[in-house]
Image (spheres, grey):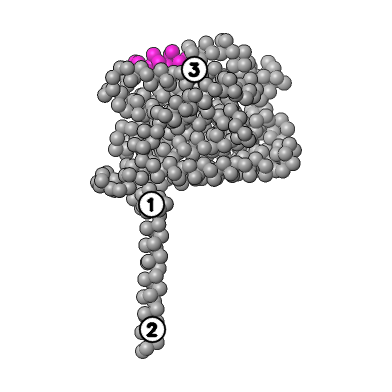
Amino acid sequence: MSNISNKKIHSKTRRKNTFESKDYLDNLLSNKILPLPWSFWPKEGRLIMGLIAFWSISGIFILGSASWWVATREMGEGAYYIKRQLIWLVASWSIFYLAININLKNWLKLSGPCLFIGMVLIASTSFFGSTVNGSTRWLIIGPVQIQPSELIKPFIILQSAKLFGQWERINSEKKIFWLTIFASILVLIIKQPNLSTAALIGILLWMIALASGIKFRNLFNTAISGFFIGATSIFFNTYQQNRVMSFIDPWKDPQGSGYQLIQSLYAIGSGGLLGEGYGLSMQKLQYLPYRSTDFIFAVFAEEFGFFGSVLLLSFLLVVAYLTLKISLNCRNNYSKLISIGSGTILVGQSIMHIAVSSGAMPTTGLPFPMVSYGGNSLISSLLIAALLVRSSIESSELLIKNPSNRLLAR
C-alpha cells in the first residue's frame, strides 16, 4: 500500500512540475519574449509570422544555390555569400523582434525624423555615393555599404499612413508640406537614377492614399502625372533608355544591353514543367549576370520549373490575402494603412522582380525581398514585415476588450 501511495505522490509531483514548467514557459513568452501571448494572437498574425519565417529561411537556400558557383570561382569559398547573408539575417530578425515589441503609436512618432534622415542620406549619394553600373545608390561607410533608398521604405509606409490616416483632420499647409517631402524623395531617387524604386514607392503612396478614402479622380490625375515624370526621366537618361530598348527588343543587341534579359529567359525556359532540380541550374554557372540579386528568380525558375514558379506566386497570393485580412481587422485607420503599405512593398516588389526576370518589365535593380543577396534589402524587408505583424497583434480581441492592458504600452 505504501508503495502505491508513494507512486501516486511521485506522479502528482511530476504532473505539478510539468504544469509549473509550462506556466513558466508561458509567462516567459508572455512577459519577456512576445508582446502578446501567442494564444491571443489573431489567426492571421500567427499565419503571417510563420510565412515570413518560412520566406526568409527559404531565401537562404535559394541564395545558396544561386551564389555557390560564383562564390567558389570569385571568392574561393562556396559559402561566402551565404555566411554574410546569415549574419544579416540574424541582425534583421533581431530588428524584427524589437519592432514587434514597439507600439505602432511610437513607430509613428519616429517616422518623421527617420524620414528626414533617410532623405538626407539619399541626397548625399549625389555627392559621396558609389556609382555601380551607371547608378549612384550606395554610401560606403567603412566596410558597410548603405543603400538609403532601401532603408527608407519602412518609414515612408509609416509617415504616409500617418498623413493619409488623418487627411480630413489636418490643415492644407501640413498636407502640402508632407506631399512636398514625398515628392522630393522620389525626385532624389529618380536622379540616382533608380526609376524602379521610385515607381515602387509611388505605387506604395498611391495605394495608401486610395485605402484612406481619397477621391479616385485625384489619384488618377496623380498617376498620370507620375507616368509623365517617369517618361521624362527616361527621355533625358541614356542609361534608362538602353534599359527600355533592351526590354522592347533584347535580340537587337544580344551581347550588350539585351544580354541580361535573354539569359534570364533562357534560364526560365530551361526549367520546363518540373525544373532541373535544386542546385542544378546551368545558366547560373557563367551566363546569367546578377544571379544572386536582380535575377535570382530566374535561377529559382530553372531549378523548380513552371510548377515551382506557380507555387511561389501562390505563396505571394496567400501573403497578399492575409495582409488584406489583417487590414480589415485593424481597429484604427493608421494600423490599416500600415498593413496595406507593408503588403504592397513585400508582395508588389516581389511581383516586379519576377516581372523583370520574365521580360514583362524593363530590367531594373529591384531585389527579391528576403531572397536576393544584400543586407539593406533584408533589414528593410523584415522591418516592414514586423510592422505588418505588429498591426495584426494590435487587432487582438484581448487588446480591443481591454484597451488599458499593459501590453499596449509595449
Which secondary structure, mark 1? helix
Left or right: 361 with respect to 44? right
Q: State the CA–CA distance, disc 3 to disc 2.
A: 79 Å
The residue sitting at 36% across, 29% down in the picture is: 161
The residue located at (36%, 84%) in the rendering is 5
**Quarter of the image where the C terminus is located:** top left
Magenta region, residue range = 217-227
Quadrant in which the N terminus is drawn? bottom left
Instruction: Relative to 409, say whether 154 is above or below.
Output: above
Relative placement, left or right, of 143 versus 72 is left
For label 3, the residue is: 187
Q: Determine if residue 399 is in view.
A: yes
Look at 40% across and 53% down and name the residue there.
Answer: 32
Label 2 sits on what residue type? Asn
In front here: 121 or 255?
121
Q: Is residue 212 magenta?
A: no
Name which of mark 3 and mark 2 comes first in the sequence: 2
| x, y percent for residue 6 | 38, 83
Separation of disc 3 and disc 1 at Cα? 43 Å
Amino acid type at image mark 3: Val
x, y percent for residue 82: 63, 43
Q: Secondary structure at mark 2?
A: helix
Disc 2 designates what residue?
A: 6
User: Circle 1 sits on which residue?
Assistant: 38
Which amino acid type is shown beneath numbered disc 1? Trp
Sequence-wise first label, 1 or 2: 2
